[in-house]
Image: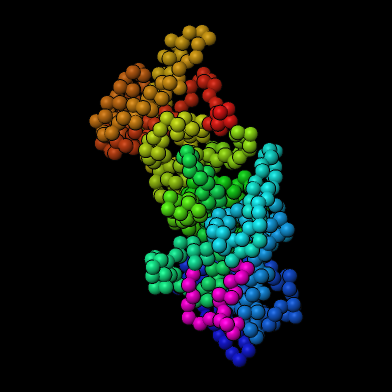
Amino acid sequence: MSVVKGAVNSQIQLNLGDPSMTLMHRAGLAGLWMTLKQLEQQYPTLAERPGNFTWSLTPRSISLNWEGQDLEVLDWLLKQSFQISDEGLISLTGLNPQSMDIETQVTIHQGITGTFLQHNKFFKSNGKKEQSFKVNKKEIIVEYKRAESYAHQHFSQHLCNEQGQLLKGVIGIAGWLYPGAVARHYAFKEQTQFKETPEQALALLFAPIACQYFVLRSYSPGKRVQYALIIPEVTNLEIYARRCWDLKGCGYKNFYASSLQDAGLRFFTYETTIEIARLNQVKRCQLITFGTVDWSPQQKTRTEIVMVEVTEEVIYNYKISCDYFSENRVIQSRGKNFISTSFVRGFIADNLVRGLPWWYNFSTKINSKDLFKRVTYEREGLYNMIQNGQWDETAQKLFVKACHEALKKTYGKIYSRTKKDEYAQFQRKAERIRAELGRCKNAAAFRQFITDFWARAGRISILEDHWEELLPLTTGMIDWKVARDLALLALASYKPSKKTNTLSPEAEESEE
């Protein structure tokens, strides 16, 4: 990128190929490209723009040209780009907000105020407002802070000197402009502050337009909602702009994700993005979570950062998990409706992003009675995933099937001992088996457990037919923890033939 100045002319050139460009900078270029495309339609003649402001756009670069005072032109550009709607929502010209439904406008507003602009120093509000949406024919009430002003609108004064000309050298960058770019030592703020050239800072201003946002629902008691920021790897400005414009109207329901990795994979698998992603070769994105930490409870801080790189296998398994685990849905609890997400889908996404088998660490993650109970409400999806998901080895799937057969015989014995009109204690037995698995802390303990479990069940045909394939898993010749994961997976996914009349976790919450 560069700045060229003459007596009365100024020019800024920005290019995706600049080696100093990070993913955030490139996202900013995409946002600026989209904004300028929209401004071309709103202000088609030079007479309508200050300083005969013109621009040239290619799939890889942006060139800005104008005459006269830099401050006047840049201030006009930012005021036109970053506006506020009549509903008090952040309105980004580059996204053509006039064509968006109110649900999409609210999700963008909440996403930006939960990530880039979550500090009230950079986002001024004049009160709260509610919007009512219909999601799956049920009413959702969403509350948000009305915008009075925000930092992007007035940043031109930080790009120019007292004479109104673009600054030379570098300027300090705050975290709202580049999340995570903070001074390492406050006592030495000047020496350790993150700095950029004014041209790079201008690019960063437009990053919120090209990024995507999700709400992450926590399954841990006492933890507040977190926000996920998705920063794409942009390699073609024109194609990525079309992707963003095509994604309008995804709806408030799709604003929620089960985990940070679930949010990243959802970003890649939206129906409208599949073809564009392939053409654009978009294979990576950066994920950042913002949540409340003990040392800074007044604002949300960057708590995790992950790079997601997709492969065909990852997308295949993730799309299967989306088919088998419930879409985000509306649940009533304590007299209010809220969006519920699939816990298991988030667990699977976490493994896929890390390059692990979709079921990996199942016993470590599902380490409590409450979590196990929650997972069993999605047992049908787990069962289908076992049947149709990809496995590293056939023996792993056979091991799960052998456990299913053992459970069938075990539950059959329980049912045979249950008197008429009595409740068959399947769930109690499942909890006992889960607790026994939880106490397996080494290979010897697990061998003892699995031997007793299968022996008590009786004759298991899969073991007899495939004992050689299953021998490494049953004897601990490979990592015994893998077998423990598979055993718990089998327990969570098996459904007894007789109904147990259990409630969903959301229904239980609503009864309390």
Residue 471 picture quarter: top left
Which residue lies most toward the left here?
444
Which residue lies most toward the top here?
420
Count of marks, rendered view: 0
Residue occupying image coordinates x 34% and y 37%: 482
Q: Position of residue 263 (x, y in %)?
A: 52, 50
**190 or 422: nearer the viewer:** 190
Residue occupying image coordinates x 48% and y 72%: 172
Which quadrant does the C terminus fall into?
top right
Asked which colour scheme the image uses, the reply is rainbow
Q: What stretch is highlighted in magenta?
A: 152-173
Examine the rendered structure and indicate whether residue 434 appears above or below residue 283.
above
Examine the rendered structure and indicate whether residue 59 appears above or below residue 452.
below
Examine the rendered structure and indicate whether residue 297 appears above or below residue 469.
below
Residue occupying image coordinates x 55% and y 54%: 114
381 on left or right of 407: right
Residue occupying image coordinates x 39% and y 73%: 191
Q: Is residue 45 magenta?
A: no
Residue 272 in view here = no
Q: Where is residue 195 in the image (x, y as percent from the top left)?
A: 46, 72
Residue 42 in view here = yes
Q: Position of residue 42 (x, y in %)?
A: 73, 70
Q: Does the magenta stretch include residue 155?
A: yes
Examine the rendered structure and indicate whether residue 158 appears above or below residue 301.
below
Q: Position of residue 365 (x, y in %)?
A: 40, 39
**257 or 163: nearer the viewer:** 163
